[in-house]
Amino acid sequence: MSKGTSGEYWTAPALPSRFKHDLLSRYIPKFGGMTGSPGGEVVHLDGYAGEGRHLNGESGSADRVLRVAAAHQGRGLVRWTCFFAERSADSFVQLETPVNEYRSRGADARAFHGDVHGLVDEVLAAAIGRPRGAVHPCQPTAGQ
Ligand SMILES: C[S@@+](CC[C@H](N)C(=O)[O-])C[C@H]1O[C@@H](n2cnc3c(N)ncnc32)[C@H](O)[C@@H]1O
């Protein structure tokens, strides 16, 4: 696991994560709405996705983005293509739950197990001719 992402990290969000998640939840809808406004589409990469949700049920960055994407799609606003990379096998297994949930409801969401660098070509290919957004929703802990 990466530094600062021990098992405890996913028990419940610590204060820095709460700030980050609050910021993301405010920023992502506006960001997506503006970036996607010319063509109604946005490509999003979360290269350090983590598990998607904390064990206490609170949303992590992936779950938050997926919720916004589903809301935008449901209202016919912006169609999001969401990529999530997670290199820890244990965290990836957890991440698949929210990603598959939203996929089953029609979202274009793809989880990738491995280093984010291995996903970049696919993301860029998907982004050709479309607006794209890359956000790095990791908290600024040492080594990240
Ligand atoms: C701080 S946690 C993610 C938190 C998550 N973004 C959130 O806010 O809910 C960072 C995650 O990035 C993963 N990670 C670190 N380096 C990575 C890399 N090069 N490629 C893919 N995942 C990576 C770690 O395994 C860890 O799960």
Image (spheres, grey):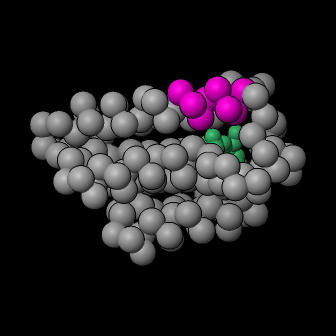
User: Could you tell me which residue is drawn at 68 percent across and 24 percent down?
Assistant: 140
Q: Nearer the viewer, residue 103 or 12?
A: 12
Q: Quadrant of residue 52?
A: bottom right
The answer to which quarter of the image holds residue 94 is bottom right
Residue at 68% from the left image edge and 68% from the top image edge: 93
Which corner quadrant of the image does residue 73 belong to?
Answer: bottom left
**Residue found at x 59% / y 35%:** 21
Q: Residue 116: in sight, yes or no?
A: no
Quarter occupied by the C terminus: top right
Q: Is residue 57 above or below residue 18?
A: below
Spot occupied by residue 109 in the image (x, y as percentages of width and height): 42, 61
* Residue range highlighted in magenta: 16-23
Please identify the residue farthest to the left as the structure is shown: 38
Tell me if residue 135 comes above or below residue 42 in the rendering. above
Residue at 75% x, 40% y is: 13
Residue 88's x, y, as percent? 72, 56
Quarter holding ligand 1: top right
